[in-house]
Image (tube, rainbow, N blue to C red):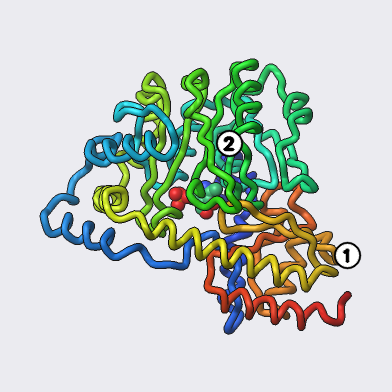
Amino acid sequence: MKSEVRIAHRVSQIPKSAIHEMTRLSRDVEDVAFLSWAKPTSGTPEHIGNAAIAAIKDGLVGGYSENAGLVRLREAIVRKLRRDNHIDANVSQLIVTVGAIEGLAAAIMAIIDPGDEVLMFPPTYSTHIRQVTMASGTPVLVPTIEEEGFALDFDAIRKAITAKTKAIVCCSPNNPTGTVYSEGELRQLAEIALEHDLMIITDEAYEYFVFDGLTHFSLASIPELRKHVISCYTFTKTYAMTGWRVGYLHADEELIPQITKAHIPFAICAPVVSQHAALAALEGPQDCITEFREHYLSTRNLMCERLDKLDSVFAYQKPRGSYLMFPRILLEEGRDSTAFCIRLLKEGKVSTTPGVAFGPSGQRHLRLSFCVPANVINTAFDRMEEFYRHRT
Ligand SMILES: Cc1ncc(COP(=O)(O)O)c(C=O)c1O
């Protein structure tokens, strides 16, 4: 009898993660200059770790918390959302989640039925695409306009809407392009959502990393949109808390009990020790955010300067936020971004992420992370200058 593991189509159709694949391949390259991860390189600020240690010592972390998260933490999040996002939130509109990712997954699971179409604007974070696929929804990719800094293409968005369109996933500041949608653009998106009765799920993971005088705008601050938006946030980037796995989701309080039904089978609650750490992050000094932002701004500028010298190999749109950018590969071999990045890794000792991982319009591009020390950027670009010297 044939014995084979039967994997559900909703999972088997998902391609392998290019980011994890590049990480795996990078392990075999000695002294690699690593620009592949969207993970802050700074450690978590000490006072946050100390709060977690104190919570452990006080015996506060051995049980579950409320499914929606510790009340004190939710109260601190309410203050943050009012102050920084201009969202008139209250504790019954929040769920503390296992990073932004679990909030996004729970939101998508709660609102997407099989066959529902979900609009996304690539190049964009591929996990969103996978989450919709896992919910048996249909991701509908509406490419952004690269020459305008990967701006939203409103004509194409309107044309892509069908009777099956249920939701929009909107990621600003964007991974991988670093684009920050303006308040005007987001208000236009809000109008479309209201006109067609669509939900908008936001991923605001990089909300604090915005440069050049731009500001981050949260759709949930628009009162009329209230019942149409689920906003996902995280401590991962803001406080360099990647491994703590804690974030939160804000939605209208009528939606919260339904989203909680999706949150419980995934997580029951976010890790309690991390919730105590998150509370300390919100209640403690906030200067680490400014320090991180200044560091990313300086590494963004350095990366752009180094790219300017490689202008026969790459053309780029300057990222206005996040700590990622998405240059176009001008060389013919960039037609296959995966082969291009693997070759650059194996022969040039620089680890990057193939653009095709962020949707088909990402082909001919690669993603570079500037959440690294300046010397890593300089080493990577010294190597690339050498590597491409004879190829252009
Ligand atoms: C746009 C975006 N959303 C979400 C995440 C994951 O966030 P978390 O660690 O909070 O789950 C990432 C991580 O790289 C990201 O880039």
Asked if marks 1 and 2 touch (Cβ < 8 Å), the reply is no
* Residue identified by numbered label 1: 332
* Residue identified by numbered label 2: 132
**Which corner quadrant holds the C terminus?**
bottom right
Could you say whether the residue bearing mark 2 is in a helix, strand or loop?
helix
- Occupied quadrant, residue 80: top left
Could you say whether the residue bearing mark 1 is in a helix, strand or loop?
helix
- Occupied quadrant, residue 257: top left
Q: In this view, does 288 lie above or below 85?
A: below
- Occupied quadrant, residue 187: top right
Q: Is residue 331 above or below residue 105?
A: below
Three-letter amino acid code at disc 2?
Val
Q: Residues within 10 Å of mark 1 (few under 14, many from 20)?
A: few
Q: In this view, does 123 lie above or below 109?
A: below
Cα distance between the residues tagged 1 and 2:
33 Å
Q: Where is residue 306 in the image (x, y as percent from the top left)?
A: 71, 72
Who's the residue at 23% across and 57% down the image?
Answer: 52
Who's the residue at 64% across and 15% down the image?
Answer: 195
Who's the residue at 65% across and 36% down the image?
Answer: 120
Q: Is residue 190 left or right of residue 163?
A: left
Question: Which mark, residue 309?
Answer: none
Three-letter amino acid code at disc 1?
Glu
Q: Position of residue 22 (x, y in %)?
A: 62, 66
Q: Position of residue 205 (x, y in %)?
A: 49, 47
Mark 1 C-beta to ligand 1 under 8 Å = no
Q: How crowded is mark 2: few (under 14 residues within 10 Å), some or many (20 or more)?
A: many
Q: Can residue 3 be seen from the camera position used here?
A: no
Foreground: 59 or 222? 222
Q: In this view, does 316 lie above or below 126?
A: below
Badge 1 or badge 2: first in the primary sequence: 2
